């Protein structure tokens, strides 16, 4: 099944990246797990899951170091996403944080650099820093994370704010609030959404209807949950695992052919929003 191609998502600048990538939240926190974490990321790259998402927050930089080891000698094969803390997101602080992330990653560039969530620094100042980094070749593009629709609208009003390349948000079967307004707003402007915690850190996998549909499709609940997100236009999915077998399982989700009847059953079990909901975060 791993011969089936991974769908791609196109960034506003025209770059196409696999829609199924790899997350690193909680990696780099325990040296005893480092080898397994590195091997899982390497396995994912081998299987075409070449988008790797990380952040200076994860493991206090430890996750970026894990990524750096996993991509050693393979930098040109991967698309690296990292994030700056909001309290580092001043004009000077963003540049310094990026330099520190580059050092931990062992690379000269980050493909997509995100503001992790809104803080006290004006968006215009952070965007100016992003544009400075982009002009210097330190980042390929920049985006945001945990921005709701009103935040995105405000961002587009600041100088160069329209250059935003992505918005990473909490989105999964049990957290569908973005579908009411944020997702369509971004889709209409060709701004990709990156869905983090796509299986709700495992909490949704025991849902009886999800289990039933998975069995009907000779799949696992996690594969169905990932396939649900990959059905959406302009959505990246970044599941995290330190288990190579789970990496292979995640990769195989692209081969599922779920019926319209089963999609309707999922909608009944995990209803889409009928009104505006505040953006959720983990």
Image (cartoon, helix red, strand yellow):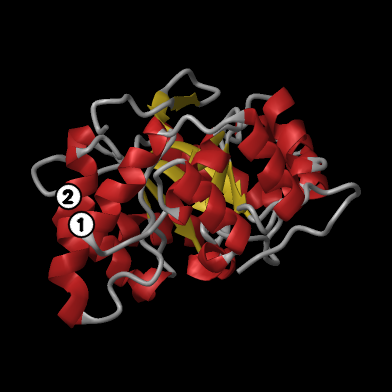
Above or below, comparing residue 54 to residue 255 in the picture: below
Q: Nearer the viewer, residue 84 or 74?
A: 74
Query: Residue 38: x and y, percent?
Result: 17, 60
The percent coordinates of residue 92 (x first, y second) are 50, 58
Residue on which the image places disc 2: 42
Quadrant location of the N terminus?
top left
Give the labeled residue for mark 1: 244
Q: Is 181 displayed left or right of 95 in the figure? A: right
Residue in the foreground of this view, choosing between 279 and 128: 279
Tell me, yes or no, if residue 238 can be seen here.
no
Q: For marks 2 and 1, give the CA distance.
A: 9 Å
User: Relative to residue 210, is residue 161 depicted above or below?
Assistant: above
Q: Tell me the residue at 46%/41% (across/down).
A: 217
Q: Quadrant of the C terminus?
A: bottom right
Residue at the outermost left position: 73
Disc 1 secondary structure class: helix
Above-or-below relation of 35 to 214: below
User: Which residue shows up at 26% across the image and 38% down it?
Assistant: 78
């Amino acid at each position: 099944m791993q011969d089936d191609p991974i769908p791609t998502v196109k960034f506003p600048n025209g770059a196409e990246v696999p829609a199924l990538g790899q997350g690193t939240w909680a990696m780099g926190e325990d040296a005893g797990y480092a080898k397994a974490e590195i091997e899982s990321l390497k396995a994912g790259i081998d299987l075409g899951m070449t988008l790797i998402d990380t952040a200076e927050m994860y493991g206090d930089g430890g996750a970026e170091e894990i990524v750096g080891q996993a991509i050693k000698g393979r930098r040109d094969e991967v698309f690296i996403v990292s994030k700056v803390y909001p309290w580092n997101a001043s004009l000077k602080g963003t540049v310094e944080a990026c330099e520190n992330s580059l050092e931990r990653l062992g690379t000269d560039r980050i493909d997509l650099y995100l503001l992790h969530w809104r803080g006290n620094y004006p968006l215009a100042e952070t965007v100016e820093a992003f544009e400075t980094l982009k002009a210097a070749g330190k980042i390929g593009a920049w985006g945001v994370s945990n921005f709701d629709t009103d935040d995105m609208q405000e961002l587009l009003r600041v100088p160069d704010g329209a250059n935003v390349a992505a918005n990473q948000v909490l989105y999964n079967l049990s957290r569908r609030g973005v579908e009411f307004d944020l997702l369509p707003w971004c889709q209409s402007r060709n701004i990709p959404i990156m869905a983090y915690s796509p299986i709700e850190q495992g909490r949704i996998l025991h849902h009886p209807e999800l289990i039933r549909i998975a069995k009907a499709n000779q799949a696992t609940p996690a594969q169905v949950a990932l396939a649900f997100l990959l059905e959406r236009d302009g959505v990246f999915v970044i599941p995290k695992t330190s288990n190579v077998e789970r990496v292979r399982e995640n990769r195989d989700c692209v081969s599922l052919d779920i019926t319209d009847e089963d999609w309707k059953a999922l909608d009944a079990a995990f209803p889409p929003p009928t009104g505006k909901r505040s953006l959720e975060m983990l």
